[in-house]
Image (spheres, helix red, strand yellow):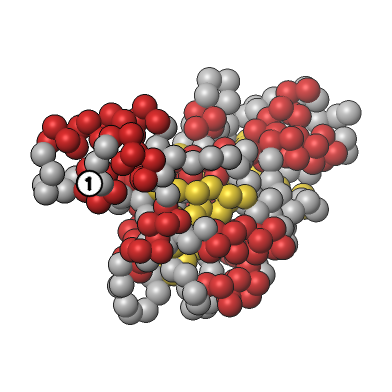
Amino acid sequence: MSYVTLKDIAKVAKVSYSTVSRALSGSKEISEATRQRVLNICREMGYTTDFVARSMVTGTTNTIGLILTSVNNPFMSELANYVEQYTRAAGYNIILCSSAHELEQEQQVFQLLMGRRADGIIIVPASQGSYASLETFIKKVPTVFISGNSRDMPVSYVSVDNHQGIVMGMEYLISLGHRDILYFGRRPGSLTHSVRVEGYLASCGKHGLNAQFKDNTNNFTSIHNGYELAKELFSHRPLPFTAIFASSDTNALGIIKAADEDGIRVPEDISILGFDNISYADLPKIELSTIEQPKEMMAARAVEELVGRIRGKKGEPLQLILPPKLIKRKSCVKAVQETASLQS
């Protein structure tokens, strides 16, 4: 592959290398007519800025790396959209990577971004072991964790209050008369989900409820995975619960699909509450009640912190936990007096 260089542009334009450089930088040392002629030739020849070469001179590439656990998860894609908006507004471009929930791949793409001279990295951690796995590299490049409570780890992070979100949701279901509430999608390997389970257990203890779980043995969450878990759950009748608190909206959507196939009515037979408030949750015939993560604010504060660190900000790491919000739609109603007893 052959790339167009500044020397190529200078040769065609019949000007010096420095004149081309000044035209691209917007320097007032050359006339507007010359600048426009050089820029037109750049477009015609398909010239693109060599950021690697520029970084050798300036020490910066104006790029930020974003590592997600999955690129096809609706919550992740919505979060990435906001991160990109605020990144561009701050004058940076973004390079998107996925860890696929794997520590080894997470480390590989982190090193890849460092090799591409990313000025900083925003990362949704793959698991509780992410910080320990990346600690050596984090010391070499500004890094902000997002959407994962990193607790006592000495790193900047922005997250929603996962514990409070679950407590908020449990109080809502209990206020509707539900006493048999299943927590769906417990995933022990995830710090975020571990914090949510703590909130669920705290609420059960406070109100004297028996904790019920449907575990997710995979290291990822998806609509299809939620569907498969729900099909297995619904194969055992009668159902010993009147409400399901799904660990994520994607799980909740899978549950709704499985329930529809098995003749279980939502919300008449079981109420379903999600977590995240992805865009799909508000679609007609779904109208999922859920706990909202403030995705735009999380992205804005993460980018703000990272850009500040890139530009020399000192001081203690930002460890910001934002409040969740209960979104009431139509998937939760008052409980019947007796535990659900749908027969197979």
Q: Is residue 173 left or right of residue 214?
A: left
Badge 1 element: helix
Does residue 296 appear anywhere in the picture? no
Q: Position of residue 131 (x, y in %)?
A: 59, 71
Tell me which residue sits at (31%, 72%) in the image.
312
Q: Is residue 252 left or right of residue 75?
A: right
Q: Position of residue 148 (x, y in %)?
A: 54, 61
Quadrant of the image for the C terminus? Answer: top right
Q: Nearer the viewer, residue 213 or 307?
A: 307
Q: Which residue is mark 1?
A: 19
Tell me which residue sits at (31%, 31%) in the image.
41
Quadrant of the image for the N terminus? Answer: top right
Tell me which residue sits at (36%, 27%) in the image.
44
Count the numbered circles shown: 1
Q: Nearer the viewer, residue 101 or 109?
A: 109
For label 1, the crowd category at 10 Å Cα-Cα, with few meaning under 14, some 14 to 19 and many 20 or more, is many
Q: Position of residue 58 (x, y in %)?
A: 33, 63
Considering every residue shown, the one lying at the far top of the view is 284
Residue type for callout 1: Thr
Q: Is residue 241 left or right of residue 96?
A: right
Does residue 247 appear anywhere in the picture? yes
Tell me which residue sits at (50%, 77%) in the image.
139
Q: Nearer the viewer, residue 97 or 73?
A: 97
Q: Nearer the viewer, residue 130 or 160?
A: 130
Q: Position of residue 225 (x, y in %)?
A: 75, 40
- In the picture shown, does residue 314 fall above or below 286? below
